[in-house]
Image: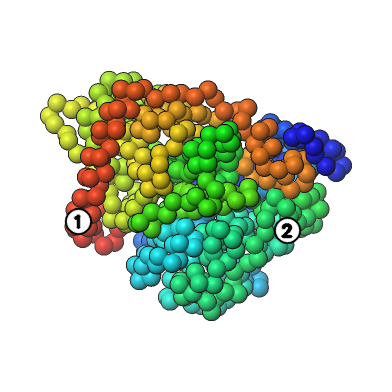
Amino acid sequence: MVEGGAFNPDVPGGRDVLIGVDAGTSVIKAVAFDLAGHQLGAAAVANRYRSGADGSVVQDMTRTWADCAAALRGLADHVPGLAARTAALAVTGQGDGTWLVGPDGPVGDAWLWLDARAAPTVMRLGQDRARFEATGTGLNTCQQGAQMAHMDAHHPDLLDRAEVALHCKDWLYLNLTGIRATDPSEASFTFGNFRSRSYDDAVIAALGLSHRRALLPPIVEGTRTTHPLTAEAARATGLLAGTPVCLGYVDMVMTALGAGVLAGHEGQGAGDVACSTIGSTGVHLRAVPAERVHLNDQGTGYVICLPVPGMVTQVQTNMAATLNLDWVLGLAAGLLSEMGHPVGQRDLVARLDGWLAQAAPGRVLYHPYISEAGERGPFVDADARAGFTGLSAGHRYPDLVRAVAEGLGMAMRDCYAAMGPLPSELRLTGGAARSPGLRAILSACLNAPLRVSARDEAGAAGAAMMAAVAIGAMPDMRTCIDHWVTPLLGAPERPDPDLAATYARLYPAFAATRAAMPPVWAALARSRPTTGEAR
């Protein structure tokens, strides 16, 4: 047993390594940590998926498992004696989507969270308020519930051939342990109630899936329950049969946990600390007690359980974040290339802070809805698109760059405003965390100090933290956070008061313009070719 808030180095067999697997949309990572949370090594294998003209985005399930096993084998090249030293393995992965398994294995390819085929079914089902009150989550095309409802109406043979409906991490857990299961986070925001962390028959009925109830797997709490690595999985991964395997929560909350959404939380008031991941997409989370969840009138966002009793995260997600910066920097790259001066993306990123400094703040509005899938947070509109407002002949390229960066900050503020009062502190992860200029903009948009974690692999760390608790290396998640997370948080970067005041004046214009745009977006959508997005 562990006492006094210290970690226990005497796990069975003297094993001193925990492995976290994070199966994201673009890459599968296997990361090793010691029992105190220090990263020892990492290996990665690129993920692969296919997109179709019908809105489909699918992934080969068998290949995904093979890639996961390859990442684990590769990890042994970076950590001497990995197999014999591994105390436990934990797995997390991309959320939403539908991974169907039948008696003989996968029922076709997995439908990913990017798959848009369920959009007509989401429109048909509508935003049922009772369902939203139970799940805390607005229905969208990403989710397994919407996708299964669409399959039931249009591809019933897929569900007829299935024995269980899993998510990505659940599929990997099945291959690692032979156990069909899911976790409380994905179970409750898709088919259940975040208060009870269990399935809700009324929610399932609202989706028209009561007759498919048998496809939903048992719910396993990974901080309390592990299952042994099978002999077959041991051969595939190079680890030892019998190694405890922990089923983590969905990757969004594992990343937030590893990056500090709860570190330093006590003493500041529940819900004061938030965590944003500004990567290709933008994920904005705040930790609150379940009884203090704010459910907005629009019925959008997610409520996702944390592996801490009574605590959940409220989540709003932007479909595109740094993809907007990639686009505006790509404009410069294209023009320079056409003039015979090719330049790499990395060189342009290095100039980002210089361009931000050359432009005055708050002069041009930019709505960062550049994804071809539209937007889902804090509003849902598949037709939403990016745009500038307020351009004049005097504006130059640095003004566009700054407007795009400020658009990310305004969209982040928009998301947090839909979840209640703005947070008093922000923890930041993702590519945006490397830019001092962008950090200053994001901090000022929330008028809150910002802290960056030195943790490289927050998602894998969050999963491994659950395993540390499950095997008794840590007594509870709060103690684990004290050891694994808090020491890696940087000093607070406080917002510039003048810049914060500028953005406080700018935000109402951003919100009003966004609210006025849906008819324009709808008209543009009608003018686009039906075979795909015009480029």
Q: Residue at x 42, y 30 (%)?
A: 448
Q: Give x and y (percent) for residue 234.
A: 77, 52
Q: Give x and y (percent) for residue 477.
A: 67, 42
Question: Which of the two residues, 465 or 293, is positioned nearer the viewer here?
Answer: 293
Circle on res. 318: none
Tell me the residue that label 2 is attached to.
Answer: 177
Dot 1 crowding, Cα within 10 Å, few <14, some 14–19, many 20+ = few
Q: Quadrant of the N terminus?
A: top right
Question: Which of the two residues, 135 or 327, is positioned nearer the viewer here?
Answer: 135
Tell me the residue that label 1 is attached to.
Answer: 519
Secondary structure found at label 1 = helix
Q: Is residue 128 above or below residue 495?
A: below
Q: Residue at x 55, y 68 (%)?
A: 200
Secondary structure found at label 2 = helix
Q: Give x and y (percent) for residue 421.
A: 40, 41
Q: Is residue 34 left or right of residue 120?
A: right
